[in-house]
Amino acid sequence: EFRFKTASGDWKWILSTGKIVEWDDQGRPLRMLGTHTDITELKTASLEISRLLAESQRRLERIETLRAIDVAISSNYDLKQTLDVILKETITHLQVDAAAVLLYHEEEQIFKHADSLGFQTDYIQKTRENQEGVVAAQHDKWGEVVDLALVEPTGFDPLFVRMMQEENFQQYYAISLTSKGKLIGALELFIRQPFEVDDEWRNFFKTLAGQAGVAIENAQLVNGLQIANLELLQAYDATIAGWSMAMDFRDKETEGHTQRVTEMTLALARLLGMPEDQMEHIRRGALLHDIGKMGIPDAILLKPGLLTDEERAIMQTHPKMAYDMLKSIEFLRPALEIPHLHHEKWDGTGYPYGLKGEEIPLPARLFAVIDVFDALTSDRPYRPAWPKEKTLAYLQEQSGKHFDPEVVKQFLSII
Ligand code: C2E
Ligand code: SIN
Ligand code: SIN
Ligand code: FE
Ligand code: FE
């Protein structure tokens, strides 16, 4: 197959077949017979097919790139992960040597380097540390591909110029990143081996920037929510700590009780192999275990002597009261078992429900042992502290009656 230029200047593709039919004395060919077929149309079609194949391959790769960014959007990646995906995909599929994402800081109205890939020096961080204006972000150029070669080079940051030289960058393109009409930042591309960018490349760059803007805004929202969430958690925990301190203040004799039982409960829970992700709930539950006593009048709570039946009945509403107080706080729902059920007994004679054995959740069963241990070894308005030996003997004696025998055994092994 070969092609030649016709007199009219068009190219024609020819398929030629031939056979030598006459030789000279030395065996050199003298004459051949054969055919020439004009295969121009066929050839054009197959060239078109391979062009189309290459093009659809390229499109596919670009769709995959956009897909990777979509995944970053929907997976709630954090900002760093999102920027990494954008830079990696940009470099691979726009075939550039280096790329940088700048983020726009609205309050200060400046751009700052957020992430970059493919640079051999650190000029990019320096030159984009506090950049007031980047060309791509000028309002009339939002969403357009800006080619540095077409920009008046007045007022370029000298560091930027030095970077272009030292990194041997021949071409620079940039585009603003926006989301819902808001400026988010800019994406900058640097090329060492110049190549001619076509419309398809530009369009892809624009599409990619559109997706990147959304992905970054999304990641910023996620980061913001995570911070707000953390602050909320800390505020809740501070509130709980405040409540439990208020409890201990009111009932002076129990001062330190809450803190001690909380620490012992966590230690025992770990010893019993309870999952780590339950520890926060157990901790909060222990801190709040007697929060229901807030509703008990001083005359009963601080009474120096034994309670009458009526007073005891009121006293025994404290677990249910804790439950009613806390149940509407979603955040404390998983922590309620201890405040609600710490006076249930293994043999079913406890309150408020008379639950029996393993009907009582494990956190409440192990808390009960520790609560009684600490109550008995402390002074109470109604009796002085018991010695430790007497207390341990009492726990042993109540094993299988008040307490889960397995829990008593483990508790005695660490006390
Ligand atoms: P608390 O003082 O924190 O006691 C918690 C639990 O430890 C008690 O739950 C009980 O199981 C055990 N405990 C505490 N002191 C003794 C004791 O001297 N002997 C024995 N055998 N066990 C003891 P309980 O009985 O359900 O009491 C719940 C709360 O009711 C107590 O919390 C305390 O605030 C109050 N209370 C109980 N009995 C009296 C009393 O006779 N006088 C007064 N003023 N308050 C009492
Ligand atoms: C060629 O095969 O290169 C020329 C065509 C011919 O032999 O006529
Ligand atoms: C707060 O608790 O929300 C603020 C600080 C304080 O008053 O303790
Ligand atoms: Fe209690
Ligand atoms: Fe207690």
Image (cartoon, helix red, strand yellow):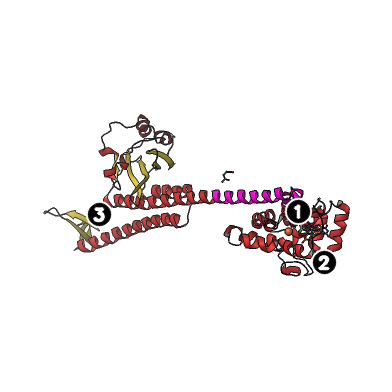
Mark 2 vs mark 1, CA separation in Å: 28 Å
Can you give x and y, in whole percent of width and height, for residue 165 in the image? Answer: 36, 32
Question: What range is drawn magenta here?
Answer: 230-259
Q: Three-letter amino acid code at disc 2?
A: Lys
Marker disc for residue 401: 2
Residue 28: quarter of image: bottom left
Under circle 1, the secondary element is: loop
253 is within the stretch colored magenta: yes
* Location of mark 3 (residue): 28
Q: For the N terminus, which image quadrant?
A: bottom left
Q: Residue furthest front?
A: 299
Label 1 vs 3, first from the N-terminus = 3
* Location of mark 1 (residue): 302
Whether label 1 lies within 8 Å of ligand 1 gets the answer yes
Mark 3 vs mark 2, CA separation in Å: 117 Å
Can you give x and y, in whole percent of width and height, for residue 332 in the image? Answer: 61, 58
- Classify mark 1: residues with Cα within 10 Å, few (<14), some (14-19) or many (20+): some
> For this view, does 241 lie left or right of residue 405?
left
Please say if the residues under marks 3 and 2 sit with CB atoms less than 8 Å apart.
no
Give the overall secondary structure of the magenta segment: helix
- Classify mark 2: residues with Cα within 10 Å, few (<14), some (14-19) or many (20+): some
> For this view, does 253 lie left or right of residue 52?
right
Q: Three-letter amino acid code at disc 1?
A: Leu
Residue 303 in sight in this render: yes
Under circle 3, the secondary element is: loop
Residue 127: quarter of image: top left
